[in-house]
Image (cartoon, rainbow, N blue to C red):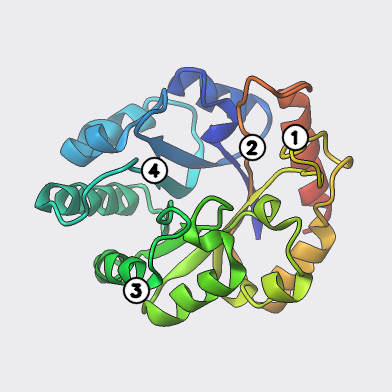
Amino acid sequence: MFVACSTLCFANEPLEAALRHIAELEFDKVELAIVEDGQHLRPSEVGEDPEAAYLRLRRGPALIPSALYLDFGPVDWSDPLQKKRFDNHCRLAKALNVAVLTMTAAPAGTPLDDEVARLSGLSATAMREGLVLAMLTHRDAVTGDPAAALKLCKAVPGLGLTLDPSHFVSAKDSEVDQLFPFVQNIHLRDTGKGADEFQVRIGQGRIEYARIVNLLNRAGYNRSLTVAILDRPDNDFDREVEVRKLRLLLETLL
């Protein structure tokens, strides 16, 4: 395992500044967030011209991409244009030597059979390119229910998860623990139990980093521990300080 930093930590800065910040914080690996309503690379742009995205990234600091995080926003996946764009993101991943593509799952309440149908085609495309598709666990998505996330992984060949424990702070450990064999990436910050405590200073929340690393080791996980302290206006702490603190903490656990 190794520690990486998501560009989501500096999502409100220009991409070049975000990458420079991450390098200055002594990370050597980065998860690239490609978000349609974000300030950095956008799926609609990368999907049309992956070569331009690749060249833009190569002009930045010498960081090693660990994964791609893709948020296409609300799109019609039956549209051939979206399939072409997804194919081009796979091309970018291969050019960057990235193995894992994280995507957002359908909203909570979506019939599971519909999500299985959507993800089966996307996962098959990723596997043909030697990549792994992993769905983010999020309380507002179908993957916010550990049982549903497990069913998806069992129903869709090759599908994995990007585990975000912050969305499971109220779930039973036994429900979440069964997901670890399917984890292909993980997003970490500290989170309290209160509704307004999604992000708190490291050490003030309920995330048990040592337990998580132990469970990942048992599952044979050998990928990234991704620091993903989100760049939000309601943060009441110095984000850079907390990003560095979490990096140091995670490194002591490896």
Residue 71 marker? 4
Q: Tell me, yes or no, whether the two marked residues, 1 and 2, touch with CB atoms within 8 Å.
A: no
Q: Quadrant of residue 205?
A: top right
- Residue 145: horizontal and vertical position, in percent? 58, 65
**Badge 2 amino acid:** Phe
Query: Earlier along the polypeptide chain: callout 4 or callout 3?
Result: 4
Query: Earlier along the polypeptide chain: callout 1 or callout 2?
Result: 2
Question: What's the residue at 78%, 26% (across, down)?
Answer: 241
Eye-nearest disc, 2 or 4: 4
Query: Earlier along the polypeptide chain: callout 2 or callout 3?
Result: 2
Please, what secondary structure does the residue beneath circle 1 have?
A: loop
Distance between mark 2 and mark 3 Cα atoms: 40 Å
Instruction: Determine which residue is flagged by label 3.
Output: 113
Q: Is residue 43 above or below residue 107?
A: above
Mark 2 neighbour class, 10 Å CA radius: few under 14, some 14 to 19, many 20 or more? some
**Badge 3 amino acid:** Asp
**Badge 4 amino acid:** Asp
Instruction: Determine which residue is flagged by label 2.
Output: 27
Q: Quadrant of the C terminus?
A: bottom right
Q: Quadrant of residue 215?
A: bottom right
- Residue 223: horizontal and vertical position, in percent? 58, 61
Instruction: Report the number of numbered marks.
Output: 4
Question: What's the residue at 49%, 54% (across, down)?
Answer: 141
Distance between mark 1 and mark 3 Cα atoms: 33 Å
Question: What's the residue at 80%, 42% (across, down)?
Answer: 194
